[in-house]
């Protein structure tokens, strides 16, 4: 409550950017845990930012989830976006099809008037199957396209909620709990100190690839994700976070 009295949204944005070591933070009013409308407002903020930073013939890689679905819903066309190719950041991670990165990429392209390419890779691959798949010329070509993305947009989830939503095995749930996983982003699970404790076996962008993308945009809100956002953002680092007031205040009240 003290923090609420002290800071307006711009102050919140600046404090949070410093605290999470990010280039830019955009805070929308409200709490997306309580209202879907706030999630849509975060989506609108991402859509606006994307329009502003887009260049013609670029590749944009997107992750999955309900927040990214809200971003897709809010996209509108622009001349740069019409020449943009939207691709999933990674293959399947066990989400229902509506929340898969592939679905989000195609939805965004449709709304933005752009193009899309999909990555059809199942989530449960053995090492052998994964290696064979990686040798396929079409997959290699697609991987090159994904890695060439200059903008990456991803959500951040609560580790336990995400592992359960993706119907993870009891062994994985126990492992995440034991290792103190609190946050998740594009299949990676992070402990409070930013340590990676697990990552999904699909293929696609790695954390190292992310460091090479010019613009990494994380979008996540709701006070329930405060700990997750605080764990993930400094590791992915340097990019933009779009969040809501309730998450922003909760993160800073922990400082
Ligand atoms: O990868 C999924 C995100 O980490 C979180 O999903 O936007 O549905 O909470 P969400």
Image (cartoon, rainbow, N blue to C red):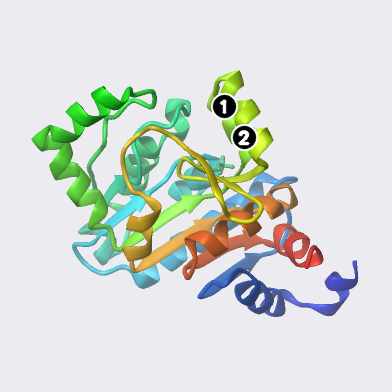
Q: Quadrant of residue 66?
A: top right
Q: Which residue is mark 2?
A: 176
**Left or right of 93, for residue 28:** right
User: Residue 239: x percent and y percent?
Assistant: 47, 68
Image quarter of residue 27: bottom right
State whether label 2 is within 8 Å of ligand 1.
no
* Residue 229 marker: none
Q: Nearer the viewer, residue 133 or 94?
A: 133
Disc 1 marks which residue? 172
Cβ of mark 1 under 8 A from ligand 1:
no
Query: In the rendering, at what x and y percent does residue 201 appear?
Result: 39, 32
Give the quadrant of the N terminus: bottom right
Asked if residue 131 lies left or right of residue 207, the reply is left
**Residue sitting at 57 percent across and 55 percent down?**
232
Marks 2/1: CA–CA distance: 6 Å
Judge from the rendering whether residue 36 lies leftward or rightward of residue 94; answer left or right.
right
**Residue 77 horizontal/vertical position (percent):** 33, 58
- Residue 224 in percent (x, y) is at 73, 47
CB under 8 Å between callouts 2 and 1? yes
Residue at screen point 29% across, 29% down:
121
Q: Quadrant of the C terminus?
A: bottom right
| Front in this rendered view, residue 89 or 113 | 89
Vertical arrangement, residue 143 with respect to residue 3, above or below: above
Q: Quadrant of residue 150?
A: bottom left
Residue 177 visible in this rendered orientation of the protein:
yes
Q: Secondary structure at mark 2?
A: helix
Left/right of residue 246 with respect to residue 164 in the rendered view: right
Residue at 20 percent of width and 59 percent of height: 83
* Ligand 1 lies in quarter: top right
Question: Does dot 1 land on a helix, a strand or a loop?
Answer: helix
């Amino acid at each position: 409550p003290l923090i609420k009295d002290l800071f307006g949204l711009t102050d919140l944005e600046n404090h949070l950017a410093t605290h999470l070591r990010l280039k830019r933070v955009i805070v929308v009013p409200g709490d997306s845990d309580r209202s879907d409308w706030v999630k849509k407002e975060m989506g609108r903020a991402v859509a606006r930012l994307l329009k502003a930073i887009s260049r013609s013939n670029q590749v944009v890689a997107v992750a999955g989830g309900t927040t990214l679905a809200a971003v897709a819903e809010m996209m509108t066309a622009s001349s740069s976006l019409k020449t943009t190719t939207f691709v999933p950041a990674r293959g399947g991670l066990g989400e229902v099809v509506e929340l898969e990165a592939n679905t989000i990429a195609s939805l965004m392209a449709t709304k933005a008037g752009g193009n899309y390419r999909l990555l059809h890779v199942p989530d449960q691959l053995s090492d052998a199957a994964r290696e064979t798949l990686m040798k396929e010329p079409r997959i290699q070509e697609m991987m090159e396209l994904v890695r060439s993305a200059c903008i990456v947009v991803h959500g951040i989830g609560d580790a336990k909620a995400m592992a359960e939503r993706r119907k993870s095995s009891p062994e994985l749930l126990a492992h995440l709990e034991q290792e103190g996983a609190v946050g998740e982003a594009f299949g990676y699970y992070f402990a409070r100190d930013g340590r990676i404790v697990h990552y999904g076996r699909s293929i696609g962008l790695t954390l190292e690839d992310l460091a090479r993308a010019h613009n990494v945009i994380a979008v996540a809100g709701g006070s329930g994700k405060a700990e997750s956002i605080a764990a993930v953002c400094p590791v992915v680092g340097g990019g933009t976070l779009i969040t809501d007031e309730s998450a922003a205040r909760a993160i800073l009240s922990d400082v």
